[in-house]
Image: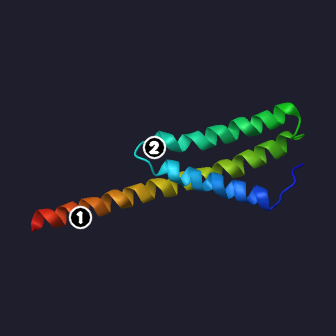
Amino acid sequence: MFGFGIYDALIIAGFLGLQFFLSARNSAYWGAIIPVLFISWLTWLLVSGEIKSILAYLLILSIGFIVLLLEWSEGRKALRNRREKELAKMRSYDMN
């Protein structure tokens, strides 16, 4: 079905890093870009016959989507923490 090598692992890690980066932006919608591309790519593989089984498609889709959703959540937490630190810094300047 799929050959998995070191380059594939690096590409996946790059996409996960990009997902985290986009999710940590001010607009939460930026984090939807990679999941939409992922779903489109997998659907294309299914339609073109690269993925032979609907079950394999659904399994890869669900696991990938869960991982991307977790990265989105971590990115949003990072943004929230960054905002809280900035707010605490501004409050400390106001007290002086």
Quadrant occupied by the C terminus = bottom left
- The residue that appears at 33% across and 56% down in the rendered structure is 83
- The residue that appears at 48% across and 39% down in the rendered structure is 29
Image coordinates for residue 78, horizontal then vertical, percent: 44, 59
Q: Residues within 10 Å of mark 2 (few under 14, many from 20)?
A: some
The Cα atoms of the two marked residues, 1 and 2, are separated by 24 Å
Q: Which mark is residue 7?
A: none
Seen from the viewer's position, the closer of residues 65 and 92 is: 92
Say what amino acid the circle numbered 2 marks: Ala
Compared across the picture, whether 22 is left or right of 65 comes to left
Looking at the image, is 6 positioned above or below residue 29? below
Q: Residues within 10 Å of mark 1 (few under 14, many from 20)?
A: few
Q: Is residue 28 visible?
A: yes
Q: Badge 1 is on which residue?
A: 89
Compared across the picture, whether 87 is left or right of 78 comes to left
Q: Badge 2 is on which residue?
A: 28
Image coordinates for residue 14, horizontal then vertical, percent: 64, 55
Say what amino acid the circle numbered 1 marks: Lys
Q: Secondary structure at mark 2?
A: helix
Looking at the image, is 43 positioned above or below residue 1? above
Q: Earlier in the sequence, mark 1 or mark 2?
A: 2
Looking at the image, is 69 positioned above or below residue 48? below
Q: Answer with the quarter of the image where residue 52 lies.
A: top right
- The residue that appears at 82% across and 36% down in the rendered structure is 46
